[in-house]
Amino acid sequence: MARLKLQKICKYYGATTALASGDLQLDPGEINVLIGANGSGKSTLCKVVAGSVRPDGGQFELDGNDIRLNDPQEAREHGICLFYQELSLSGSLSIAENICLYDLPVRSGALVDTSRMTETAQSYIDKFASVVGEGFAHDTPVNKLRPDQKQLVEIMKTLASEARILIFDEPTSALDRSQVECFFSILRELKQEGRSIIFISHRMDEIFEIADRITVIRDGTTVSSHPVGETNQETVIADMIGEHPKATEKKAETTAQKGQVTTRYLDVENLSGNKLKQVTFSLGKGEILGLGGLHGQGQSALLRTLFGAEKRQSGTITLDGKSLRSGNPRAAIRNGLSYVSGDRVRDGVISERPILENVSPIHFIKEGKLFAFPQTLGQVVIPALKVLNTKYAHLNNSINSLSGGNQQKVVIARWLTNPPDILLLDDPTKGIDLSAKTELFALVRKLADDGMAIILYSSEDAELLAHSDRILVFNNGSITRELVGEDKNRFNLYQAAYSGAE
């Protein structure tokens, strides 16, 4: 008998369908790996199992009995515990307190039994003793830990629940290989004890290493579920995107001319830094170079490092034959680089200030100005705003009076007032409507046609495929593949994103 069985689970948030028909079966002593593209519904389905999301329909069976979970506490009472992708640790508490948070041992009614808590926590710390690194002790506050160490504490906290159904939503995203191997060894022991595990990962090598079964979700619907020995990477990726590779597309992989840049303008060689490992590529004038792969694999880090917003550890950057030293954004601007972020709040708008102030700072830097008359300055910036069809009433109005799409246009116009040589676009259409996206990409193509060199990262695969001349696919801080010509399609993009560097 299946330990857990979900059929036709659905979940709606207004007009948005998070799950249309989620099916999942989990047997005792089984690791079922759940895989799908970003936004496919994997995490929502797991949260339904863990009681943190209530489904709007479908059947939920536990040990053959229909069940309805109202909250995570009720799920834990039934032996279900979820590792949250967004860490749920308390930074001010110690490692031991976080590990035992689900079931703190008490004495005298209400006082925490620190001796038992420490003993329990230490038993889980010992399982990872060879890979936790320095400064990892039961009494260490969590806010003093590195990201990988925090992730290990979250794993230990989940294991300490002693639940018979454990759900791990991307638990290895911040771990190195030795930490992953240690964790997988523990999972295999749990499987031998009869525990059941749902595991979400975007790393194809991990999936085939740890899975007994692979279940694929696409657009909120479970489309396949096979024992690991009855499927392969190509089939899994085809199920994820709903299409198979064409025979002609495989030929492109051996083309001698693949990925060559005829007029090299920017050369990056062995660049390493925050989330970057030995990145090498070239960019030509008039080219739109796309950065693909799953979110957070180094694409934004590359753009920010080129712009001087993040520190370069090693490697060289050559612009038009001139070597660029590690600098800062102001130096990058003087060298002809520009950076547009999709995170308007963090990197874009100057909140509550006039539109004029938001659109003009780069002009002041490039022209070396200390002040300007508003009327004169307005005549300088208005053409750039018009090119983008920016809708605003008056330049003196607050930037906050504009829609998100028009705020983003102001940020982009900031750079077009004094056009750069290289435009770095970091998910620039995030949070803006379809009309604004269409206008933006029409402008980006025109700028490239006029000779501007452009690097584009987008979290939407369709944007990369439609608007990039080439695509560099990132995985874990490295370029795993370069896609160009017939090679540039969804299947190859996903295959490279979910596979390690060759």
Image: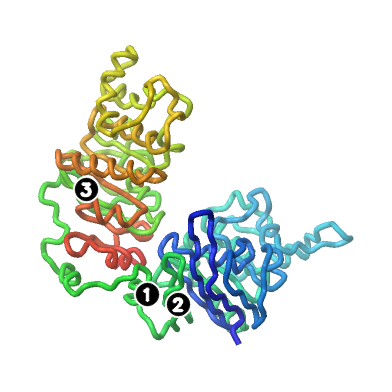
Q: Position of residue 322 (x, y in %)?
A: 18, 38
Quarter of the image that includes the N terminus: bottom right
Quarter of the image that includes the C terminus: bottom left
Front residue of this view, candidates 20 and 395: 20
Query: Residue type at mark 3?
Result: Ile
- Left or right relative to 309: residue 381: left
* Disc 1 from disc 2: Cα separation: 8 Å
- Left or right relative to 451: residue 174: right
Residue name at image x 14 percent, y 52 percent: 261
Q: Position of residue 158 (x, y in %)?
A: 63, 66
Number of the label disc, if any, that sits on residue 236: 1
State the residue position of label 3. 288
Query: Residue type at mark 2?
Result: Ile
State the residue position of label 2. 214
- Residues at badges 1 and 2 in contact (C-beta under 8 Å)? yes
- Left or right relative to 248: residue 141: right
* Disc 3 from disc 1: Cα separation: 30 Å
Front residue of this view, candidates 86 and 466: 466
